[in-house]
Amino acid sequence: MKAGDGATERESADFGFERVSLDEKQGRVDSVFHSVARRYDVMNDLMSAGLHRAWKAQLVSMLRPPKGRPFAHLDVAGGTGDVAFRVLAAGGATTRVTVLDINESMLRVGAERAKDKVEGASDRIAFVTGNAESLPLPDAAFDAYTIAFGIRNVPRIETALAEARRVLKPGGRFLCLEFSAVDIPLLDRIYDAYSFHVIPRIGARVAGDAESYRYLVESIRKFPTRGAFSGMIERAGFRHVTDRPLSGGIVAIHSGWKVS
């Protein structure tokens, strides 16, 4: 890429610590998640020492799906169903969840799990193949949208945020759980050492794939700061935007509302 080539810069994206074309990033991200799909939730346990369960519980607690009225929920990049099952358990009998993921391997895992985890699964949860940047869903169709540990893998984050707002009803809520920057001295160094030296080894041993988990670690470091990402959410048209750091800033839950 030539210095000053603004068009080329706009058409590229981070893939971990590499700079690649937008199309190449999407293809390589797909390859990563095809590789790890079957062991994705096991690896989340190992990578986070089980904390991802508490973080997702906090996400659903903030969502507060109602028990007394219909509630249409969209969970993006949630192929294995981990967040979706929690939303269904927290909501009422008329809560419905659409799980959308670009990766069919992840969706197959979620659909298989749903048979055991969700009573009346065929009526309460749907698994849809789709791209967060171009949702195959109608305008103003959902009461809430969540994305957990998925937004940093999207090549065009601004486009995905605009799509999130489009499919939400007026008064609908956007919630994003994503890794963030540790803001406690010493913990940041411990976290870096664990991330770059331990997690790829765990990936090699448990999933037979160190490179995919090295990418996942690098992608966390390249994600915007909490303030920068909150600014992106506001520019997408959301209001009352907040961010809530958890576990010393290892992750954060970002919230925004579609006011009209």
Image (cartoon, rainbow, N blue to C red):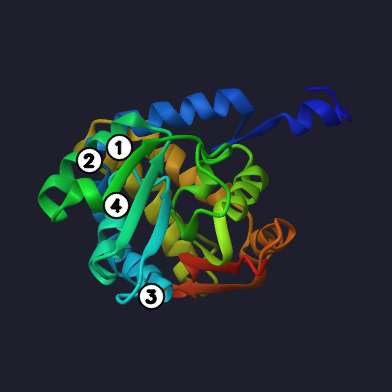
Residue picked out by circle 2: 111
User: Which quadrant is the C terminus positioned in?
Assistant: bottom right
Earlier sequence position, callout 1 versus callout 4: 4
Tell me the mark number nearer the camera, choosing from 1 and 4: 1
Residue 107 location, quadrant: top left
Q: Amino acid at mark 1?
A: Leu
Q: Would you say 192 lies left or right of 119 here?
A: right
Earlier sequence position, callout 3 versus callout 2: 3
Q: Nearer the viewer, residue 256 or 1?
A: 256
Residue picked out by circle 4: 44
Query: Where's residue 202, x and y in %?
Result: 26, 44
Which labelled disc corresponds to residue 64?
Answer: 3
Tell me the mark number nearer the camera, choosing from 4 and 2: 2
Tell me if residue 166 comes above or below residue 95 in the rendering: above
Q: Residue at x 65, y 34 (%)?
A: 13
Instruction: Label 1: state its secondary structure.
Output: helix
Q: Give the CA separation, mark 1 to mark 3.
A: 25 Å
Q: Give the CA separation, mark 4 to mark 2.
A: 19 Å
Tell me if residue 225 comes above or below residue 39 in the rendering: below
Instruction: Label 2: state its secondary structure.
Output: helix
For this orientation, the residue located farthest to the left is 116
Q: Residues within 10 Å of mark 2 (few under 14, many from 20)?
A: many
Residue 149 in view of the camera: yes
Which labelled disc corresponds to residue 3?
Answer: none
Q: Are marks 4 and 2 in contact (CB under 8 Å)?
A: no
Residue picked out by circle 1: 107
Query: Where's residue 207, x and y in %?
Result: 23, 35
Q: Give the CA separation, mark 3 to mark 2.
A: 24 Å
Residue 39 in view of the camera: no
Instruction: Label 3: state its secondary structure.
Output: loop
Q: Residues within 10 Å of mark 3 (few under 14, many from 20)?
A: few
